[in-house]
Image (spheres, grey):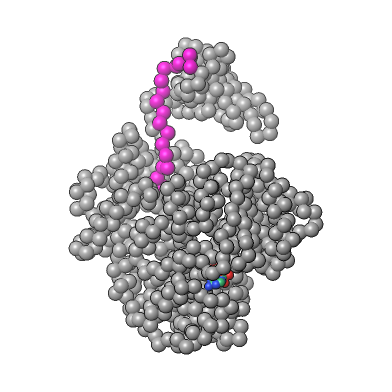
Amino acid sequence: MDLSTIKGLGEKNVKLLQQCNIFSVEDLLAYYPYRYEFLNPNHFVTSDEKMVQVVNATVEGEAKVSFIRRNFNRLSFRVIIENKIVSVSIFNRAFLKANLTNGREITLIGKYNEKKNQFVANDIKLNVIKEAKITPVYHLTKGLKNVHFENWILDALRKPILVDDKIPEYYLEQYEFIPKLTALQYLHKPQNAEEIKKARLRLIYEELFDFMFKILYLKENETKAYGLQRELDLDGVENFISSLPFVLTEDQLKAIHDGLEDLQSEKRMNRLVLGDVGSGKTIVATILMYANVLAGYQSVMMAPTEILATQHYLSLLKLFEGYSIHIELLVGSMKVSEKKKVLERIQTGQVDFIIGTHALLSDQVLFANLGLVVTDEQHRFGVNQRKNLQNKGFRSDVLYLSATPIPRTYALTIYGDMDTSMIASKPNGRKPIITKLKKDNELKEVLAAIYEEIKLGHQIYVVAPLIEESDSEDLKDVNLLKEKFELAFRDKVHIGVLHGKMKSNLKDEVMKSFEQGELNILISTTVIEVGVDVKNATMMIIFNAERFGLATLHQLRGRVGRNDLQSYCYLISNQDSERLHVLEESNDGFYISEKDFELRGQGDLFGVSQSGDMTFRIADLKRDYKILLQAKKDALAFLESKAYLRNAYFLELTKNIDFTN
Ligand code: ADP
Ligand code: MG
């Protein structure tokens, strides 16, 4: 149903909602609150100045605003609470002044000091709360207020909406789940905590059942799917391997072996190479791509960022110098004319290796004879995206690379539809990265360490969490850091800056000069997080380290320690966090991910919330693991008994996943 049917939802708001991925009334209802505010107005307590209380009051007279300093103001007014005149103040709510008219009834939340006869409010509800009330709290985007969501969703709940109940009737009955629509009502407009609980349980189960059904269905069909059966030029592959400047590790060889078998077999390859950062997944993929090309097919590799795609492209060019292999890059920022040429060459089969970003998913990209699809940093892409590229080839094989070492049990569930090759060991000669926690006031020490590394001719990454000046002053902004560093090192070092808002050709330039050693230090936001490979970089400095999850920090740290030089990582944080010590102790991504999971749940598993395969609306893999296991069991029975063939929703779902091309 169209969003414009909702009362009070104009065109401008429709645009804002789209930023939250809400495109229809159904989407709006599926925008679940992430927490609740419980408010229960009570009798006024004057004797306890520490107690946070919720009281109703009547405005008396007019409110005054005083501006204390920039971005800081106080709103003061008088009210009557249970026959007592009290003065109220609240900070940074000057905008409420016009609403606080004489005689208006409001609800105050805050603390009362009897001596001063003053109520310091931290919130004011203009719609007076008469009885206990639970307010759902939604994630907001700029320009939208919580009350917008409350009102629109309330209106949406009154509409004759058809919601997909994805739980098969059999399980609905078995578990005595409430109907979907009731669940939505309970979730968005709960009368009590019990309703929230019931609604959540049902919606979590539904989400996980749906997810597991898809995974299991994929798995069942993958095992049946036919791929390209090729004759491989194993001597050619062998020759290439022996020409490499290093010896492959056992795990790498095993993964290559698995992949070669897949390429030769009539079964379609659907393989995940799972390995810690720096374990050398790229070369494994490269060798398989080469084997596929030798057999007469095109190979494509998709990476999540242009920087990474460009880097893969450049290193492949180097690696295949002197071979008659044609390699092209395809990224969104290319000139139209340039792109057109590349597209034509791809379509006419003049290119063997195609490296690119999401741009590869465009309908314009047609392959002459695509044989192998590689997705690097697979966890960055959603299930649909990965299927999409694969479907561009006739029975093409697929290989996924993922650096995210997630706990094994979870990995097996989540990636249950794929065969996996694990690369557990790092290439020989790698020294563990020495990691140290430092406070802001120890920066001098860190700067000295940086200078030592630069004198050795090594390079440094510095990660700052934000791009622009923010209101919170202790966050280090990239440009600010650059100034600071330049001041510290005078003009003895060359510093480059990289952040997400830069044009991509500029980014590439900066990255290139860092790779070529022209820059000693690269200060950036987390854009460098994924995959970049500069062997000469030996030190990683991360500011405000407490803002990142362990898995992300480990990935960032993995940018250094890429050859046999001793590498270092400094985590700078003023907070004493036990969490960060895990990184001082260990360089093992699998161990760290277990710890991260233990300490924080799935939240930051991939460093990017809201993207990739494991984005759930309401379920949480760790918290809801038991429900996941149950849902998996149920989904399997549902699939095996073929009951899904009599279920409209699931039947439709299976029709939309097409393996037969
Ligand atoms: P990741 O698994 O994180 O994607 P990469 O594939 O980028 O790691 O590999 C990290 C670095 O290690 C690269 O510079 C790569 O050339 C190098 N490398 C890969 N395999 C080996 C090996 N067996 N011995 C030495 N260096 C290797
Ligand atoms: Mg990589």
Can I make out residue 419 in this image?
yes
199 left or right of 312 in image: left
Total of numbered circles in the picture? 0
Residue farthest to the right?
A: 491
27 left or right of 454 in image: left
Is residue 151 or residue 507 the one in the foreground?
Answer: 507
Is residue 577 or residue 117 the one in the foreground?
Answer: 577
Which segment did they paint magenta?
29-48
Residue 534: x and y, percent? 62, 66
Is residue 490 or residue 201 the one in the foreground?
Answer: 490
Residue 196: x and y, percent? 33, 38
Residue drawn at the location 36% of the way across and 67% of the way down = 418
Residue 369: x and y, percent? 45, 83
* Res. 496 image quadrant: bottom right
Vertical order, 126 against 364 (above or below): above
Residue drawn at the location 40% of the way across and 25% of the way down = 40
Residue drawn at the location 53% of the way across and 25% of the way down = 121
Vertical order, 570 against 82 (above or below): below
Residue drawn at the location 53% of the way across and 47% of the way down = 581
Quadrant (top left, top right, bottom left, bottom right) of the C terminus: bottom left
Residue 364: x and y, percent? 50, 74
- For residue 39: magenta? yes
- For residue 534: magenta? no
Is residue 258 or residue 109 the one in the foreground?
Answer: 258
Magenta stretch secondary structure, dominant: loop
